[in-house]
Amino acid sequence: MTEPTFAPRVFSGIKPSGGLTLGNYLGAIKRFVEMADGEFETIYCVVDLHAITVWQDPAELTQATREVAAGYIASGIDPEKSILFNQAAVSGHAELAWIFNCVARVGWMNRMTQFKEKAGKNAEAVSLGLYAYPALMAADILLYHATHVPVGEDQKQHVELTRDIAAKFNHDYRTDFFPLTEPVIEGPAMRVMNLRDGTKKMSKSGESDMERINMLDDADTIAKKFRKARTDPAPIPGKVKELADRPEARNLVEIYAALSGTSAEAVLAEHEGAGWGAFKPALADLAVARLGPISDEMRRLLDDPAEIDRTLARGAERARQVAAPILAKTYEIVGLVRG
Ligand code: ATP
Ligand code: MG
């Protein structure tokens, strides 16, 4: 049997669960922009249905949805070229997620580390949606037959689960309808860490604002957060392997490398022997130079929310056109009668 070929297509998304962070920029958005310039058709989503797996104030959810859209556009995603929309506007995501809820196994869900981390000791009281989240994510990706998904390191397990769901669907229904999607996780800073605790990742929804750099932070705030970032007393080493047991040091070096478009090796070669008192201001200057123009443009776009909503609506129309035949065929394969 010959394998079907799928056109190279990228899908990825970010939740409007708070303000965008430097982790979202380096782990996701920056690479979304790069992939939009390549051989791929690119589909980028504001995944609002994922955001409500934990409580979101309705007005803040609407605002955060526009902020993620503004972050995409201000960073260089062209909404004419890429398809840019919000998930709730295309009902196929929720529809396919239901079918995948019936394909995925409870045992698979029980292995998801994000659920364990987010639920913590409170696993009995969190929403059913938080538990089912990876099946919705599989639906987001497979509704478009996406072949590649750029994500940060923390989402690798969910993309692997997406492959498992596609493979089980294909096996159970004796078809080769869904592709086995590849995660794309390349470069430094694919897991940007919390500035106050180098063992935890930086997150939009983290407790303290001091632990993250927000894309909308001003220059003084960025400088202050890096100045107060936790480090160890040793100076910057010469070799990457010497960062292995120094999570905070490694994090700052990787952020520097990603922002300057080089490798951790190159950053160490340039700064070997320097103390944090010299390195942190250089890092802050680099972050401000990189994020400043983007946050200015985000603010300008956010001044006209109706225009953002129109852009999202146009993207949703295009997304529906891609999704509709794939969803219709899925129903047919499953044997669901739709009239
Ligand atoms: P939340 O705390 O609500 O989960 P988040 O900051 O983790 O928010 P998500 O919307 O869950 O953001 O993830 C969006 C994208 O950003 C994903 O591709 C994810 O891998 C990436 N990402 C999130 N945090 C980081 C990080 N610290 N480093 C690198 N990539 C990240
Ligand atoms: Mg997350």
Image (cartoon, helix red, strand yellow):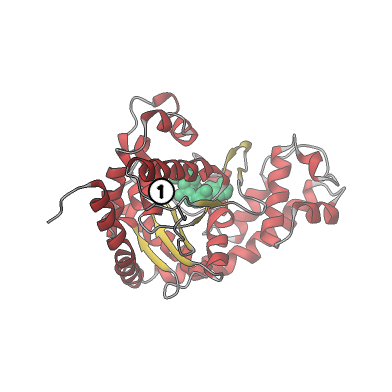
Q: Is mark 1 within 8 Å of ligand 1?
A: yes
Image spot of residue 22 (x, y percent)? 57, 54
Who's the residue at 68% across and 45% down the image? 251
Image spot of residue 271 (x, y percent)? 83, 53
Q: Quadrant of residue 293?
A: bottom right
- Nearer the observer, 212 or 260: 260
| Left/right of residue 253 with respect to residue 208 in the rendered view | right
**Residue 113 higher or lower than 32, as above or below:** above
| Left/right of residue 304 with respect to residue 21 in the rendered view | left
- Nearer the observer, 228 or 79: 79
Who's the residue at 82% across and 47% down the image? 275
Q: Quadrant of residue 269?
A: bottom right
Q: Which amino acid, by three-letter code, is at mark 1?
A: Ser
The residue to which callout 1 is attached is 17
- Nearer the observer, 115 or 21: 115
Q: Dot 1 surroundings within 10 Å: few (below 14), some, or many (20 or more)? A: many
Image spot of residue 140 (x, y percent)? 37, 52
Q: How many marks?
A: 1
**Residue 125 higher or lower than 319, as above or below:** above
**Residue 117 higher or lower than 257, as above or below:** above
Image spot of residue 295 (x, y percent)? 52, 65
Q: Work out whether residue 235 can be spotted.
A: yes
Q: Work out whether residue 204 can be spotted.
A: no
Spot the residue most to the left: 339
Mark 1: which secondary structure?
A: loop
Who's the residue at 74% across and 37% down the image? 246
Where the C terminus falls, by quadrant? bottom left
Spot the residue most to the front: 1
Who's the residue at 44% across and 70% down the image? 82
